[in-house]
Amino acid sequence: MHSWIIYAFIALIAYSFTNLLLKLVSGEDPVFMVFIINLAATCVVGVYLLVSGGEITINRNPVIIAFIVGLFASFGTVFAIKSIGLAPNPGYSVAIYS
């Protein structure tokens, strides 16, 4: 089996759990939840870099672009949490923003 297929199914499972868990916290403050989500993601990436021995090089343009992507991702997460909480069925919301 091709490795990309395995990775795609792992992503499917991860995103499914993400959407289900977002529904559980939909009543919480979205800004605080985005902070916790991004903090967890930062910790996971940090641990991965430490374990894999990855070398970190910092270039200015990719850092600026990554910062902008982070802003969009944060806004997306805030509004995803709000829409999941307000939708009659969370699948409607997820279908629209996916």
Image: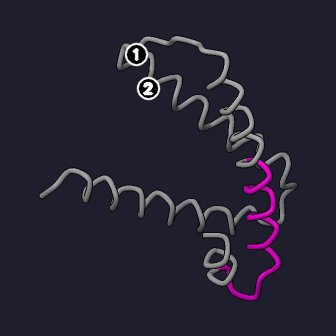
Percent position (x, y) of residue 89? 69, 86
* Callout 1–callout 2 Cβ contact below 8 Å: yes
- Dividing the picture into quarters, in which one does residue 24 lie? bottom right
Q: Earlier in the sequence, mark 1 or mark 2?
A: 2
Q: Residue furthest left?
A: 1
Which residue: 42% across, 63% down?
A: 12
Residue 34 placement (x, y as % from top left): 76, 47
Q: What stretch of residues is rendered in magenta?
A: 74-90
Please tell me whether residue 5 is drawn above or below residue 74 in the rendered image: below
Mark 1, other Cα within 10 Å: few <14 / some 14–19 / many ≥20:
few
Secondary structure under tag 2 reads helix
| Residue at 52 percent of width and 32 percent of height | 44
As shown in the figure, which amino acid type bears the numbered disc 1? Gly
Give me the disc on residue 38.
none
Q: CA distance from mark 1 to mark 2?
A: 8 Å
Residue 31: x %, y % from top left:
85, 48
Q: Which mark is residue 54?
A: 1
Give the residue pinned by disc 2: 48
Residue type, mark 2 in image: Tyr
Magenta highlight on residue 29: no
- Main SS class of the magenta portion in the image: helix
Q: Quadrant of residue 67?
A: top right
Scheme of colours in the image: one colour
What is the residue that sits farthest to the bottom in this orientation? 88
In the image, taking residue 78 as reference, residue 54 lies left or right, namely left
